[in-house]
Image (cartoon, grey):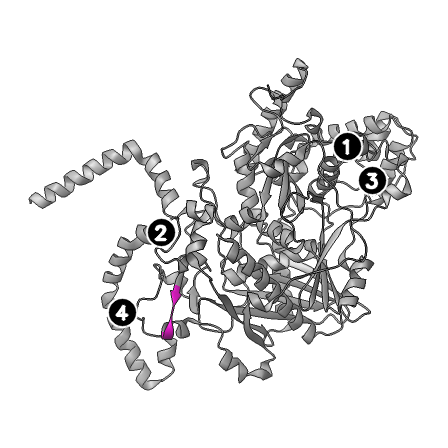
C-alpha cells in the first residue's frame, strides 16, 4: 500500500514538472538522443528482451522441429545469437536485412504521407556465424552460378586510385574581387550589410543582383557536355580510358552509389538551434531523385557520360532562374564593376570575339577506367589546395517556389539563426540537399572547399567559406570516412558502367540509376538508343568495418573504443578520429541482370521512375501580375539601347533565352512590346517554344509561409527606398 502511494505521488510530481519544463526538456532530449541513443534506449531494450524471452523459446522449438524435416529451414530461420558483438547497438526488427539475393520488384509510386518525427536506424557490428547468416552477397554461391552473368567481388577504397592528369593547355583560373578573399580565412557567416545598423562590411554595389534576363549569357563560353568537349575526348583517348565525364554528369550517380555503400547514413544535423528539432532529417527529396545519364559511344572505342536532363520528356528550363543566376553571379564575384558591366545585354555588343571565346579552366583526374573533368571557378594561392568552387545559393523562397521568383525576391535573410529568414536555415537545407554533390565536385577537382554567396534574385545577403573538411564532418562524421566513401563510390560506378556495356556493347545507352530511400539495394535500367533493347540490373552489397559485418548505416563511430557514438564536439573538432585508428571499410557486391523481368515490366518500372522525376518540375501558380511587371521592366531597360530589345525578343523566341516556362495568364514578351509600342512588330510573329509543365494551383503551407514573408520583405524594401539613405561602409577606428 505504501509503495502504491509513493508511486502515485511520484507520477503527480512528474506531471507538474513536465508542465513547467516540457519544452526545454524536449529540446534537451532531442539534442542528446542522437549523441548517445544506446543509453536512451537501453531500458526499453531490456524490457523488450524480457518480454520476448518466451516468444524466442517457442520460436526455437518450432525451428528445431522444422530443421529435422528440412535441413535448409535452419538457415531460413536462424536462431538469434546470444553472443554479444563488439560495439553493438540496440536493434529493431525492422533493421533486419533480408537474406535473399533478389530484391522485390519496384512498386508504383504513391503520394508521400505526412512528415513524421524521424528516428535514425542504429548501427551494429556482427561477427562470426551471426555475420555469415546476415549477409546477402554470398560470393562462393555466385561463383557456382556464373551462367547468370553476374558481376561480383570485393571493393575497398585502396582498390581505386585517383591521379591528376596534366591538361593539354595552361589553365587560367579567376580570383575573387571586391575584397571578398578575406572570407576565405575567417570562418563563419560574413554579412554583406548589417541588418540592424545598415552598415556595409563590403562594397555596397555587391548588394544589388542584376535581373536574370538582363545579363547576356551568350557572351560567356558555352557549357560543353562531355561528348562535345573535344579536349576531354582527346585526353581520354590519350590516357586510354574507357569512360569520361564531368562533375555535373557524374555527381548524381556517385550520390546513389554512396547511398547504397553507406546504407543511407544520414548527415550530421546536430548543433542547430531548437527551431529545427521538428524539421525533417536525412537527405532531401531532391537529393534522392533517380539519376539519368546518356552513355554515348565514341569513335575511339570509349564512352562519354552526359547528364540526361530531358529524360522525363520536359524541357530543361524549370530551373532557368537558378542556373542562369549562378553563371551571372560567378562573373559578378570575380570581375570588377566595369568588367561585369560589359556582359550586360545593353553593353555586350562591345565585347570582342577574343573576350567572348575565353576557354574555361578545368582540372582532370583519372582512375583505372574513368577520366573526370571538373571546372575550376576560382583560386587563391594561400589556400592548401589553391583552388575552390563558387556556389551561389538562392534562398528558400527561390528554390521552393521557382516560378514565383519576382515575388520571392522580397524574402530576406535578416537573422543569423532561426527557421525562417536566417543563414542557419539556408545552411541546414544545404547540408541535406547539396553538400554531398558539392563534396564530390570538390574532390574531383582537387579543390579546397566552396565559397558560398547567399542571395535571392534581387540582392546578396552574405558570404561563407566552407572547407572540404567541414563538409566531411557534416556528411560522414570524419575525413577518413569521406576519403574512403569517395574512392569506393567511384569504384562501384565503374563496375556498374562495365555491367551495362558488357551486356549492350558499343552502343549509346540511356542509364537511369536509383537507390530507393532506406533500401538495401540499387536498381539501374539500361536502354539502347539504337536497338531499343532494355534491361534492368540489381546491385546488392554487404558492408564491413574492420572485418565485422555492418547492420544498419555505415558509421565509423561504431568502432569507437569507449562509446557507440562520439560526442558532437569531438566529431566537429576531429578528436574522436584520433581514438579510432585505421578503420578498414570494404563491401562485397553483386550486380545481377534481371533476366526474369520481361521487357514490358522493365519499361513499366522505368515509367514509374520518370513519373517521380517529373514531380520535381511541378510548380505552383505564381503571382502573374509581378511576372508581367518584371518582364515589362526588362523591356523598358532594353529599349533605351539601340538594337538591344530586338535582339532580346529574337533570343526569347528562338529558344536561346527562353526563360522560365510561361505561367497560365502570363503575357509573352512580344505581347508586352506590342502593348508598349517600342517596336513595329508583325501581327504573326514567332512564338516561344511551349513547355509541358504541370502547374499546381494551390500552394502548400510552406509555400504560403514563404510568400507571406516575401510580401513583408517587399514592403520593408519600399520603405527603405523612400528613405534614400547614403550607404555607409565599415571602417576600423
Query: In this figure, which residue is indicated by the disc labeled 3?
Result: 652
> Could you say which disc has been placed on residue 56 in the image?
4
Up/down of 541 relative to 348, above or below? below
Q: Are marks 3 and 2 in contact (CB under 8 Å)?
A: no
Residue 611 lies, in percent from the top left, at 63, 55
340 and 168: which one is in front?
Answer: 168
- As measured in the structure, the alpha-carbon distance from the residue carrying label 3 to the one carrying label 2 is 56 Å
For the residues labelled 4 and 1, say whether their Cβ atoms are less than 8 Å apart.
no
Q: Position of residue 200 (x, y in %)?
A: 63, 23
Q: Report which residue position mark 1 lands on.
A: 336
Mark 3 or mark 1, which is nearer to you? 1
Which residues are the magenta region? Answer: 125-129
- Residue at (70%, 68%) from the top-left corner? 527
Q: Cα distance, mark 3 to mark 1?
A: 28 Å
Which tag is nearer the camera, tag 2 or tag 4?
Answer: 2
**Residue bearing the label numbered 2:** 37
Q: Dots 3 and 4: beta carbons under 8 Å?
A: no
Would residue 398 be seen by someone viewing this image from the given angle?
no
Relative depth, front residue between 90 and 470:
470
Which tag is nearer the camera, tag 4 or tag 1?
1
Mark closest to the chain's N terminus, 2 or 4: 2
Q: Is residue 168 above or below residue 682?
A: below
Which disc number belongs to residue 223?
Answer: none
What whole-number distance in Å separates the C-alpha atoms at marks 2 and 1? 52 Å
**Could you tell which of marks 2 and 1 lies nearer the N-terminus?**
2
Alpha carbons under labels 2 and 4: distance apart = 25 Å
One can see residue 441 in this view = yes
Asked which secondary structure carries label 4, the reply is helix
Instruction: Answer with mark 3 or mark 4, whichever residue precedes in sequence.
Output: 4
Amino acid at each position: 500500500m505504501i509503495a502504491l502511494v509513493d508511486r502515485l505521488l511520484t507520477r503527480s510530481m512528474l506531471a507538474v514538472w513536465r508542465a513547467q519544463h516540457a519544452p526545454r526538456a524536449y529540446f534537451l532530449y532531442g539534442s542528446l538522443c542522437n549523441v548517445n541513443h544506446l543509453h536512451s534506449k537501453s531500458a526499453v531494450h531490456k524490457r523488450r528482451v524480457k518480454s520476448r524471452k518466451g516468444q524466442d523459446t517457442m520460436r526455437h522449438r518450432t525451428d528445431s522441429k522444422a530443421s529435422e524435416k528440412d535441413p535448409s529451414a535452419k538457415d531460413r530461420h536462424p536462431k538469434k545469437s546470444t553472443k554479444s558483438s563488439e560495439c553493438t547497438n540496440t536493434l529493431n526488427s525492422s533493421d533486419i536485412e533480408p537474406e535473399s539475393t533478389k530484391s522485390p520488384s519496384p512498386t508504383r509510386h504513391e503520394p508521400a504521407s505526412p512528415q513524421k518525427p524521424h528516428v535514425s536506424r542504429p548501427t551494429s557490428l556482427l561477427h562470426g556465424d551471426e555475420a555469415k547468416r546476415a549477409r546477402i552477397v554470398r560470393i562462393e554461391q555466385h561463383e557456382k552460378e556464373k551462367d547468370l552473368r553476374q558481376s561480383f567481388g570485393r571493393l575497398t577504397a585502396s582498390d581505386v586510385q585517383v591521379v591528376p592528369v596534366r591538361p593539354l593547355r595552361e589553365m587560367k583560373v579567376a580570383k575573387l574581387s571586391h575584397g571578398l578573399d578575406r572570407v576565405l580565412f575567417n570562418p563563419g557567416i560574413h554579412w554583406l550589410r548589417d541588418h540592424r545598423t545598415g552598415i556595409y562590411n563590403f562594397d555596397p554595389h555587391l548588394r544589388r543582383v542584376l535581373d536574370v534576363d538582363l545579363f547576356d549569357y551568350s557572351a560567356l563560353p558555352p557549357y560543353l557536355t562531355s561528348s562535345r568537349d573535344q579536349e576531354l575526348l582527346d585526353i581520354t583517348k590519350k590516357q586510354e580510358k574507357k569512360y569520361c565525364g564531368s562533375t555535373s554528369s557524374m555527381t548524381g550517380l556517385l550520390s546513389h552509389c554512396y547511398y547504397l555503400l553507406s546504407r543511407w547514413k544520414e548527415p550530421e544535423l546536430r548543433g542547430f538551434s531548437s527551431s529545427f528539432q521538428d524539421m525533417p532529417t536525412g537527405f532531401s527529396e531532391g537529393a534522392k531523385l533517380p539519376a539519368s545519364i546518356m552513355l554515348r559511344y565514341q569513335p575511339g572505342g570509349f564512352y562519354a557520360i552526359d547528364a540526361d536532363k530531358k529524360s522525363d520528356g520536359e524541357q530543361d528550363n524549370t530551373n532557368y532562374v537558378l542556373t542562369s543566376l549562378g553563371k551571372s553571379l560567378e562573373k559578378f564575384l570575380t570581375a570588377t564593376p566595369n568588367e561585369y558591366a560589359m556582359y550586360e545585354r545593353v553593353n555586350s555588343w562591345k565585347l570582342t570575339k577574343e573576350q567572348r571565346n575565353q576557354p574555361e579552366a578545368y582540372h582532370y583526374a583519372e582512375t583505372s577506367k574513368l577520366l573526370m573533368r571538373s571546372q575550376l571557378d576560382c583560386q587563391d594561392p594561400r589556400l592548401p589546395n589553391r583552388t575552390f568552387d563558387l556556389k551561389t545559393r538562392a534562398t528558400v523562397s527561390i528554390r521552393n517556389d521557382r516560378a514565383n521568383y519576382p515575388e520571392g525576391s522580397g524574402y530576406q535573410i535578416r537573422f543569423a539563426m532561426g527557421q525562417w529568414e536566417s543563414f542557419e536555415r539556408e545552411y541546414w537545407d544545404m547540408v541535406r540537399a547539396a553538400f554531398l554533390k558539392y563534396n564530390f565536385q570538390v574532390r574531383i577537382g582537387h579543390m579546397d572547399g566552396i565559397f558560398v554567396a547567399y542571395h535571392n534574385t534581387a540582392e546578396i545577403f552574405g558570404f561563407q567559406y566552407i572547407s572540404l573538411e567541414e563538409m566531411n564532418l557534416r556528411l560522414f562524421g570524419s575525413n577518413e570516412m569521406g576519403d574512403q566513401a569517395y574512392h569506393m563510390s567511384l569504384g562501384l560506378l565503374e563496375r556498374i558502367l562495365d555491367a551495362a556495356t558488357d551486356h549492350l556493347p558499343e552502343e549509346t545507352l540511356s542509364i537511369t540509376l536509383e537507390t530507393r530511400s532506406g533500401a538495401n539495394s540499387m536498381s539501374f535500367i539500361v536502354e539502347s538508343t539504337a536497338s531499343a533493347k532494355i534491361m534492368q540490373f540489381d546491385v546488392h552489397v554487404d558492408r564491413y568495418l574492420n572485418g565485422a559485418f555492418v547492420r544498419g548505416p555505415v558509421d565509423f563511430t561504431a568502432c569507437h573504443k569507449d562509446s557507440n557514438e562520439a560526442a558532437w564536439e569531438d566529431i566537429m573538432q576531429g578528436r574522436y578520429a584520433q581514438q579510432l585508428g585505421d578503420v578498414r571499410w570494404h563491401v562485397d557486391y553483386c550486380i545481377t541482370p534481371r533476366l526474369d523481368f520481361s521487357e514490358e515490366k522493365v519499361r513499366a518500372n522505368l515509367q514509374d521512375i520518370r513519373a517521380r522525376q517529373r514531380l520535381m518540375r511541378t510548380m505552383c501558380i505564381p503571382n502573374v501580375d509581378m511576372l508581367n511587371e518584371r518582364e515589362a521592366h526588362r523591356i523598358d531597360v532594353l529599349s533605351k539601347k539601340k538594337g538591344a530589345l530586338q535582339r532580346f525578343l529574337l533570343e526569347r523566341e528562338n529558344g536561346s533565352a527562353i526563360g522560365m516556362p510561361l505561367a497560365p495568364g502570363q503575357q509573352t514578351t512580344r505581347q508586352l512590346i506590342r502593348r508598349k509600342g517600342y517596336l513595329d512588330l508583325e501581327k504573326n510573329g514567332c512564338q516561344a517554344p511551349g513547355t509541358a509543365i504541370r502547374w499546381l494551383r494551390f500552394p502548400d503551407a510552406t509555400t504560403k509561409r514563404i510568400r507571406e514573408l516575401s510580401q513583408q520583405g517587399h514592403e520593408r524594401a519600399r520603405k527603405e527606398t523612400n528613405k534614400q539613405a547614403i550607404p555607409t561602409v565599415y571602417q576600423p577606428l
